[in-house]
Amino acid sequence: MTQSAAAPAAEKPAPAAPPPRTPALGLRLDVRTLSLLGVLAILVLVGGVTKPDEFLAVSNLQLVLTQASVIGVVTVGMTLVIISGGIDLSVGAIVALASVWATTVATQDFGFTGVLFTAVLVGVGCGLVNGVLIAYGRMVPFIATLAMLASARGLALQITEGSTQVVTIPEILDLGEKDAYILGVPPLVIVFAVVVVIGWLMLNRTTFGRRTVAIGGNAEAARLAGIDVRRQRLYLYLLSGLCCGIAAFMLIILSGSGQNTNGNLYELDAIAAAIIGGTLLSGGRGTITGSVLGVLIFTTITNIFALNNLQSATQQIAKGAIIVAAVLIQRRTAHE
């Protein structure tokens, strides 16, 4: 009787495994991207209706893309840092320091290569300081980058003594002219596109990107899984500094000068663009594509307000409302 009773129990089928949830996540991410594209399309429609001749002009669209390119490069580096659970408040100050250091008279004596090399070197150097303090000095990213913000701004002011350093190198100035456009596309936009593609590939197609997401989701679990968390964070702040150096050189081309006020509030614009693009401030999730769309949205808003002669205060209020709405949407989708 015991054996016959046990036999049916042994033949009882195992419960089916729950279906995977990956498609739902992918759908949600696609919906977020489509939503950002929808917002951008609405802004383009508003600009086309309010100022059709000015806004839809090819020259104005080229201007919007060019202005988006400089802050966009900074935002790519910022996005990677935030995904890892960090923050970088010093990006604007690093851009200023790199631009003025690269446009000193002594540096310009070395020509185009000297200015480019100096801008990138200063950016990477500042990123190295941030990375060492945060990764190996165990400083809170907010404090370490805030200190860099103050120091870099002060050093930029000391170098320029409050004056504008004019670029005298023809090869640099020519890149800002329309004759340098390639098939109607400004060179700065091409640089921005290259940085975006490289950033997207690093985040989505390399172990570097997977490690970045892992330490942003749970740094201790990532460490136990064999990831060198400190080294990874150092690399991320180096990348952020590199992006700032590239952006500084782009700004030199755009303005033809170096000023200690360059990059003002870039840190806030980059963080805001990353947030509305779907990057979590707590880390562990984010997309380069979303951040790029966030940059384009903010740049388009600025352009529309300028064309319609609206006050900058109203523009800032609109940006703030968009950021609040994006964060509320993030909280809602995170609990779904």
Image (cartoon, rainbow, N blue to C red):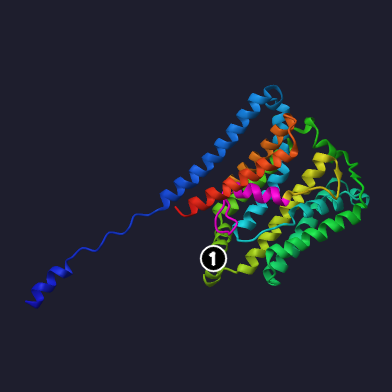
| 132 versus 291 height, above or below | below
Q: Nearer the viewer, residue 238 or 37?
A: 37
Q: Nearer the viewer, residue 272 or 165?
A: 272
Q: Can I make out residue 329 in this image?
A: yes
- Picture coordinates of residue 95, whole percent (x, y): 78, 51
Q: Residue at x 73, y 28 (%)?
A: 59
Q: Can I make out residue 188 in this image?
A: no
| 301 versus 57 height, above or below | below
Q: Residue at x 44, y 52 (%)?
A: 336
Total marks shown come to 1
Residue type at tag 1 = Asn
Which part of the image, by quadrant, shows the N terminus? Answer: bottom left
Is residue 58 found left or right of 41 in the rendered image? right
Q: Please say whether residue 113 is one of the residues in the magenta stretch.
A: no
What residue would you read off at disc 1?
218
- Return the residue found at the far top: 53
Extent of the magenta region: 267-287
Is residue 85 found left or right of 170 in the rendered image? left
- Return the residue found at the far left: 1
How many residues crowd around disc 1 within 10 Å: few (fewer than 14), some, or many (20 or more)? some
Q: Nearer the viewer, residue 200 or 292?
A: 292
Which quarter of the figure has residue 151?
A: bottom right
SS at badge 1: loop
Q: Please say whether residue 285 is one of the residues in the magenta stretch.
A: yes
- Picture coordinates of residue 219, whole percent (x, y): 57, 67
Which quarter of the figure has residue 213?
A: bottom right
